Amino acid sequence: MSASAALSTVQVTGSNLNITYVVLAVALGALAIAFGLRQQVLAQSDGTDKMREIAEAVQEGAAAYLARQFRTLSYFVGIVFFLLFALPADTTAIRIGRSIFFLLGAGFSAIVGYNGMWLAVRANVRVAEAARQKDGTKAVQIAFRTGGVVGMTTVGLGLVGASLVVILFRENAPVVLEGFGFGAAMLAMFMRVGGGIFTKAADVGADLVGKVEKNIPEDDPRNAATIADNVGDNVGDCAGMAADLFESYAVTLVAALILGKAAFGNEGLIYPLIVPAIGIITAVIGIFATRLRSTDKSAMTAINRSFFMSAIISAGLTGLATFTYLPGKFNLLTNYSPTVLEEAGNINPRVLAFGAVIIGIVLAASIQVLTGFFTETGKRPVNDVAASSQTGSATVILAGISVGFESAVYSALLIAAAVFGAFLLGGGSIVLSLFAIALAGTGLLTTVGVIVAMDTFGPISDNAQGIAEMSGDVKGEGAQILTSLDAVGNTTKAITKGIAIATAVLAATALFGAFTDAIKEAVIKAVGEGTTVALEYQGVLDIASPRNLVGLIIGAAVVFLFSGLAINAVSRAAGAVVVEVRNQFKLHPGIMKGTEKPEYGRVVDICTRDSLRELVTPGLLAVMAPIAVGFGLGVGALGAYLAGAIGTGTLMAVFLSNSGGAWDNAKKMVEDGNYGGKGSEAHAATVVGDTVGDPFKDTAGPAINPLIKVMNLVGLLITPAIVSFALPTQKSTSILIALVAVVVIIGALIRNRRQSTNIEY
């Protein structure tokens, strides 16, 4: 029996189907817990009249931006929905299901992002009020439980989508899940890019005029960009990151189920659902266990404690589930492939699965420690960046770049070690090895509920400090509590970005494996097994081929181009913000005297307009570049393209994220009184570093995560069509599709270039 014949016998029935229903129930339970936590947060006091007024302005700005963004993205979603119908599928039902679940994936991603933003802009004022009451424990609890709401929503909706697909489509679930994952990834990428441009345009503009030119505090109410800055924190860090981690969750499940079906048969479609269901249980424990103790040096200690606690519990419960559900011998699996059995040898399915999950959990913990070392205040790298401020902004820039480069190497090696460790568990079987890599991704994501909570903690604490400073109602000890929480928030954001990068690499690597399997199946369907044409596809990913090498170079280049577009977008939008804020100070002298109120809405409108305009080109590049390479150069070049994007994207994302995090916390160190404190030349130097780092860590860097997954999913979806059109009778059609994609990319780049920075006084 051939592998493909074996796969067709895979079924989801009986106890396996019942387990899937249990997983669905657990996922719905996560949503119920999210609702309960939400009510707890909203029940807290929302501060003084002045604090509420500022918070409401932030709420209105964030809601208006996301509403406009979703309207813009709805056109993209609608077009892709119909295009998916044109791609090959075994049956019409699968084709329809793939498109419908594409919409569901995009919708869930939007819900997660909007929910994160909606609650964060209401929690920030409550955290500020807790600090005003000098209750640091409550402030930490409110901020983290708000993040817990977003975290439980993320894991709940992700698992609801995956389990529903398995229940409805059974053995055909992996193909339909490609649509679900693609919808989640595409929307997350747009939200990451758009939100990232918004937040950093406002932040950079506010810093350059307020801190540098006018020498006023970061969140001084006289600065017209302050409301937009606070809005940006929520649409970029809360909505964007929540959507990003949701799509990581969804895409990892896609890869795990595709490869699980090929590797473990029936059990391979169920086990990848059991692991994240366990993650929901441990996330609940971690969220409720996060409490600030009197002995804790900072909130970071309490957060780290809950993270590692949830990781350890996840490992224990996963071990119990693995040895209960999976058999001890490969031939005891149901509807496994004889080919895989032959390759497996004496591999114990329990050991493979549990070992892979443990690798993922250990990777998450290791990334947390490593990223914390390079970005946390008090650690040597950040201390060195802060110390370099004594010799000017140039040395601050150099020191931060150095931290980013060095940390990228260690992070990449750590991720590579995890990938290779999981690969070794497969014992030489490519299918089993790739399944192990996918399971490592699910293991890492057992902690995603706590990870999302950690990330959301950052913008909430930042906003809380902003509201406190703008209102003037939080003084002394309360202000110090918020300053400390803001510094911790910078670190948690950097850590979660590192973990998000790791999930992206694991998911992309697993999808890459699914992509190679898709090539084989597409060739067999198109021309038959064992034919001359089919044999030509053996070794199609050989890097010695000039065609494939070109694909590799293009894949690496796209990451650079994407990053450049994102950073340049921030530069242009920030320039417009700077001009607006300067003009308001110039035309309304009463603003500095406190007798006139700035026009905050004008800056919010500028950031909204520019961010939505600028996200189009990077989005088109992500979707069209794989199409151009695949149809123009073939599936081998497309595979090399994806490999180049994964490798370069890993290094670039870590470099950008950690450089930015180091610069931000170096500024915090100086503002805390080191090297001359606020208003000193050293402070001005660190402000420049932080300004450069803003689009690094909050725009370009995080957007690379969904980028590489979007491109991998596009590659996976179009592979059958590429193989079909590669036949002699269809080659002209293939070239035409590639040319159209190239024209779209060139047109988007020309349009982008014509939108040059227009600064008018």
Image (cartoon, helix red, strand yellow):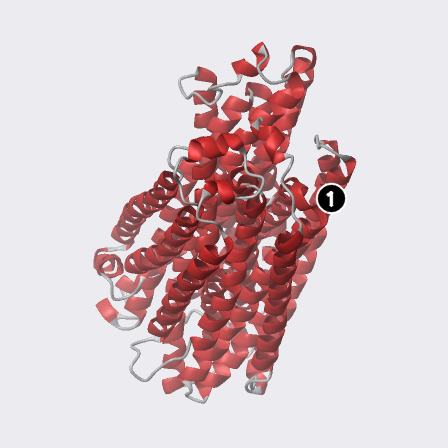
Left or right of 568, for residue 388: left
Residue 466 visible in image:
no
Residue matched to label 1: 97
Residue 396 occupies which quadrant of the picture?
A: bottom left
Left or right of 86, for residue 135: left
Residue 432 location (% of width, % of height): 45, 38
Residue at 54% x, 30% y is 517
> For the residue marked with disc 1, what is the amino acid?
Gly
Which residue extends farthest bottom? 133
Residue 648 location (% of width, % of height): 40, 37
Residue 399 visible in image:
yes
Image quadrant holding the N terminus, namely: top right
Residue at 46% x, 69% y is 457
Left or right of 147, for residue 172: right
Viewer-closest of 18 and 461: 18
Residue 403 location (% of width, % of height): 28, 50
Residue 650 occupies which quadrant of the picture?
A: top left
Q: Is residue 543 above or below residue 96?
A: above
